[in-house]
Image (spheres, coloured by chain):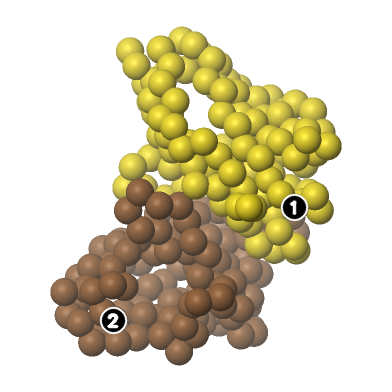
Chain colours: A yellow, B brown
């Protein structure tokens, strides 16, 4: 079983819609969860991090964490074509290391 | 804040040569830096964890004698690909963990290596 799993997509949504990206993880000891965005040919860019159960909002982005279900999600409201990218979920393993999922490709059509 | 730079952004070299890539945290001190490799259409693969002033910790399957890592200061880590071969061609990305801020990693822009 992979440590961090994401649906590879592509997830296609129309402009203005809500995009919902999901991630599950296997290590129950994980405490820190991150979402990165990666445009094609570029390096990852941190969008949000979440440590506590529940929701965390930052502008159009909302991260949701459910430790009991080992599930973390990212909602993007009012999706824009510029949001089209691959979204990477990352989970801490141990003290320092992050393990990344394979990413979900999001396509927002005008 | 939390800007990480990498140099060079692109490098083309002949098989058998060595290539050095620098990773710098520009506006914060990084006690830990990480080196990743990403092949086309694949996810990030951690190669090694670099702690300032100590030896790097390599992931399973990564040759420490081929990928030399030096983390001489709180703002600079270097990765040297020794005796590069075409199969080493990849996108190498470093990240830096901000001291005192849990596990958040900030990524550099990456270095594309092409070995001919």
Q: Name the residue under label 1.
A: A27
Q: Can residue B75 be seen in this view?
A: no
Q: How many labels were placed on the picture?
A: 2
Q: What element carries label 2?
A: loop
Is residue A25 shown left or right of residue B13?
right
Instruction: Determine the residue positioned at 34% across, 86% down.
Output: B82
**Position of A26 relative to B91 (above/below):** above
Instruction: Determine the residue positioned at 68% across, 25% down.
Output: A57
Mark 2 falls within which chain?
Answer: B
**Residue B21 falls in which quadrant of the image?**
bottom left
Q: Name the residue under label 2.
A: B84
Label 2, residues with CA under 10 Å away: few <14, some 14-19, many ≥20: many
Label 1, residues with CA under 10 Å away: few <14, some 14-19, many ≥20: some
**Position of A102 relative to B91 (above/below):** above
**Position of A44 relative to B18 (above/below):** above
Is residue B19 shown left or right of residue A21?
left
Instruction: Determine the residue positioned at 64% across, 31% down.
Output: A73
Residue B23 picture location, percent across and down: 46, 68
Among all residues in the image, which is located at the extreme front? A1
Q: Can residue A67 be seen in this view?
A: yes
Q: Are callouts 1 and 2 both on one chain?
A: no
**Residue B87 falls in which quadrant of the image?**
bottom left
């Amino acid at each position: 079983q992979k440590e961090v799993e994401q649906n590879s997509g592509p997830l296609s949504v129309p402009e203005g819609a809500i995009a919902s990206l999901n991630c599950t993880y296997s290590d129950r000891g994980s405490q820190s969860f991150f979402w990165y965005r990666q445009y094609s040919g570029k390096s990852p860019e941190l969008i949000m991090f979440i440590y506590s159960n529940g929701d965390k909002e930052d502008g159009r982005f909302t991260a949701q964490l459910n430790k009991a279900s080992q599930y973390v999600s990212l909602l993007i409201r009012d999706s824009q074509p510029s949001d089209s990218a691959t979204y990477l979920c990352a989970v801490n393993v141990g003290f320092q290391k992050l393990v990344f999922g394979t990413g979900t490709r999001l396509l927002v059509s005008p | 804040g939390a800007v990480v730079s990498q140099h060079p952004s692109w490098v083309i070299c002949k098989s058998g040569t060595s290539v050095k890539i620098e990773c710098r945290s520009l506006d914060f001190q990084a006690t830990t830096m990480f080196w990743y490799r990403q092949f086309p259409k694949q996810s990030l693969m951690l190669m090694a964890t670099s702690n300032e002033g100590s030896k790097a910790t390599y992931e399973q399957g990564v040759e420490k004698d081929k990928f030399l890592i030096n983390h001489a200061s709180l703002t600079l880590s270097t990765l040297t690909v020794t005796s590069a071969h075409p199969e080493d061609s990849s996108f190498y990305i470093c990240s830096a963990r901000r001291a005192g801020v849990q596990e958040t990693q900030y990524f550099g822009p990456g270095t594309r290596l092409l070995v001919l």
